[in-house]
Amino acid sequence: MNLSRRLESLRYDGNTGGAPNEAAIPDAGTGTTGTLSQIQEAKAAEASNTASHPDDGSPSTIHASEALRDLKERASKTLFERLGSRLSDSSMDEAELHQFVRDELKVVVDEEQVPLTSAERQRLMAEIIDDVLGHGAIQRFLDDPEITEVMVNRYDSIYVERFGRLHKTEAKFSSDEALRRIIERIVSRVGRRIDESSPLVDARLPDGSRVNAIIPPLAVNGPSLTIRKFGREALTVNNLIEFGSLSPEMAELLRACVLARMNIIVSGGTGTGKTTLLNVLSSFIPVEDRIVTIEDAVELQLQQEHVVRLESRPANIEGRGEVSIRDLVRNSLRMRPDRIVVGEVRGGESLDMLQAMNTGHDGSISTVHANSPRDAVARLETLVLMAGMDLPLRAIREQVASAVNLIVHITRLRDGTRRVTHITEVQGMEGDIVTLQDAFVFDYSAGVDANGRFLGKPIPTGVRPRFTDRFVELGIPISPAVFGAHMAGGVR
């Protein structure tokens, strides 16, 4: 049975008094008649009055939703056929392409001759345009500023992160093919590819949002897509202070450290906000400094003008042409940088980064995955070993101790908030151990409020870092009250 007949079969022969172009549908649950939209409104009212869900199993509701879904799939397929190569026509700008798609879609929907209300028609056209030009079922989540991450486990299972908490949505793609089409559109825009021979890829959206996609045979349940959104505006240090992620005293210390050209490592787990904090730290770099940034996928939003942005490149389909982070770090040393900012060290490039910090490129900043400042040191040691150099462990630790001045650790707490929990000085070596000293730690002892939100805040340990002598030499002012005096600290 074709779509028009299926909707026609749902008509009711009685006099409904409704608009002539709307299909009157008998509702098995209530015995009433009306248009699809009227019945849906009646059921919504009934649900609010009885505080219970409507009978979603009624034949009329199922048939109507199936008919609309079939109409969407049919119209989308026809529209793709009519558009052809125009979707990739570089001679058309975005505005012209959107207008052309809207005009063609109107013709396609009119040809179906299906009775729809004005609201249903607008919703149908908006969803099809999202499929063709946007990101399909997840487009509205990408447009929602409150959502920070979108996770598509498979075509019919979509989760979002809002205010640090995960929520399952009712949205879904029509099929694996529809999800695969969105993934291919995203990766093709940044010159990447995804297919059976290269079934996983890191990419980015035009706004800088980070994208990871993986497809069968690696993804057993079908294509999977994860998008970590970037805010429309880069967060500033004042924003982090307002959110409670930083204290004003922490911000003053970090600003002085950047101006004094300290080498800083930002550590933390996945999704804790390391890149955001890296952006904030980079905002303290003087405008006259030449900055070279190195990333797997461009995410940093530096506000300075004198910036050279480098991005690694995966191998092509023949397995050639790969340019790694390590290659870019080595190349950056020949580009006369004042500062080198590496988005993340995760392999042998950590050795080159430490050597750069030790050979005149002070003021460099990078991030590393770790669960604590002490773990960050251990992870750097492991990453240096991945460079393939047969170095003794003590030599590696000496490299770390002499290269890194400061570790800033950020944690995602159970309440969903992201807080800087440690600012830790790397003091040097004692025997075979790299010695660390906390300048700030997060006060967990304050407990939580009725909503489960942590009441604590970062507090100074009362120990003044050794590197503050450098502030005096360079004439960088910092208030003595920054470090407090009410807590004692010791070398760990």
Image (cartoon, rainbow, N blue to C red):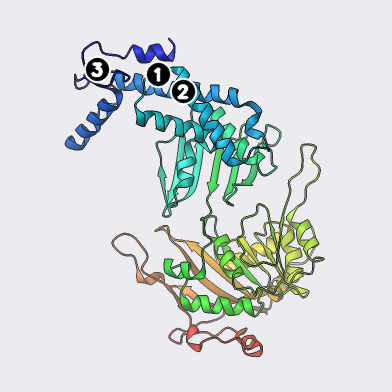
Q: How many other residues sit within 10 Å of disc 3, few (<14), some (14-19) or many (≥20)?
A: many
Label 1: how many Cα within 10 Å (few below 14, some 14–19, many 20+)? many
Tell me the mark number nearer the camera, choosing from 3 and 1: 1
Quadrant placement of the N terminus: top left
| As drawn, 18 above or below 148 | above
Give the residue at x 60% y 73%: 284
In the image, residue 32 sits, relative to residue 50, either above or below, namely above
Of the pair 268 and 143, the residue shown nearer to us: 143
- Residue occupied by mark 2: 109
Rendered image: mark on residue 26: 3
In the rendered structure, which disc, 2 or 3, sits on the residue that comes first in sequence? 3
* Residue 114: mark in rendering: 1
Image coordinates of residue 226 in percent, x first then y, are 54, 44
Residue 294, above or below 107: below
Looking at the image, which residue is at 72% across and 52% down? 312
Which one is earlier in the sequence, the residue at label 1 or at label 2? 2
Q: Amino acid at mark 3?
A: Pro
Residue 330 horizontal/vertical position (percent): 79, 62
Q: Is residue 10 left or right of residue 402?
A: left
Q: Disc 2 residue type?
A: Val
Instruction: Identify the amino acid type marked 1.
Output: Val
Q: Are marks 1 and 2 in contact (CB under 8 Å)?
A: yes
Looking at the figure, which quarter contains the C terminus?
bottom right
Residue 458 image-quadrant placement:
bottom left
Front-most of residues 141 and 401: 141
How packed mark 2 is, by other alpha carbons closer than 10 Å (few <14, some 14-19, many 20 or more), is many
Cα–Cα span, label 2 and label 3: 25 Å
